[in-house]
Amino acid sequence: MNAEAPIPFPSSAQVSEQVSFDRKELGLILRVYGRMVAAGEWRDYAIAAMRDLAVFAIFRRTAETPLYRIEKRPKLRHRQGLYAVVGMDGRVLRRGHDLDQVLKVLEKRLIGPV
């Protein structure tokens, strides 16, 4: 029987930090998402946490490309803003420092013409 040295757990310096949405941010996003689901506009979502950004993707149907992406990029915190709403075609619809204000671009789509 071979006795091998145990593999140590990575220290905090070795683990790369991931950007993610906190509870308050998710609450704001899910409030808008819930209203749009109730209106029959959206049906699915996905959340991704990566090293340099966090993404909340919104889908009309599960097998499609996302209609909108809500992105959180900490590196842009001092420039254009931490949050952005990106459309299906890749255009930035709104960017800013306050998530509640950035999400208003999605609420305007709900109010649209009757």
Image (spheres, rainbow, N blue to C red):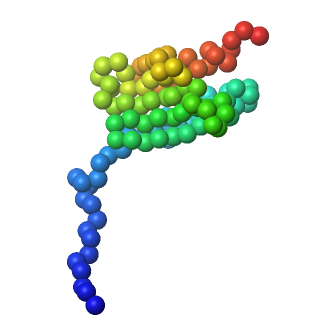
Picture coordinates of residue 75, whole percent (x, y): 30, 29
Can residue 96 be seen here? The reply is yes
Tell whether 89 sits left or right of 12: right
Q: Quadrant of residue 34?
A: top right
Position above or below: 98 against 5: above
Position above or below: 10 against 41: below
Which residue is found at the position 67% from the left and 18% from the top? 110
Which residue is found at the position 64% from the left and 37% from the top? 62
Q: Quadrant of residue 71?
A: top left
Tell whether 36 sits left or right of 78: right
Q: Residue furthest top?
A: 113
Picture coordinates of residue 13, whole percent (x, y): 22, 52
Position above or below: 11 against 70: below
Tell whether 7 sits left or right of 48: left
Can residue 31 be seen here? The reply is no
Closer to us: 58 or 62: 62
Picture coordinates of residue 11, whole percent (x, y): 25, 59
Position above or below: 3 against 67: below
Quadrant of the rendering where the C terminus is positioned: top right
Quadrant of the rendering where the N terminus is positioned: bottom left
Which residue is found at the position 34% from the left and 31% from the top? 74
Which residue is found at the position 43% from the left and 26% from the top? 83
Closer to us: 54 or 4: 4
Picture coordinates of residue 102, whole percent (x, y): 49, 20
Q: Residue furthest bottom?
A: 1
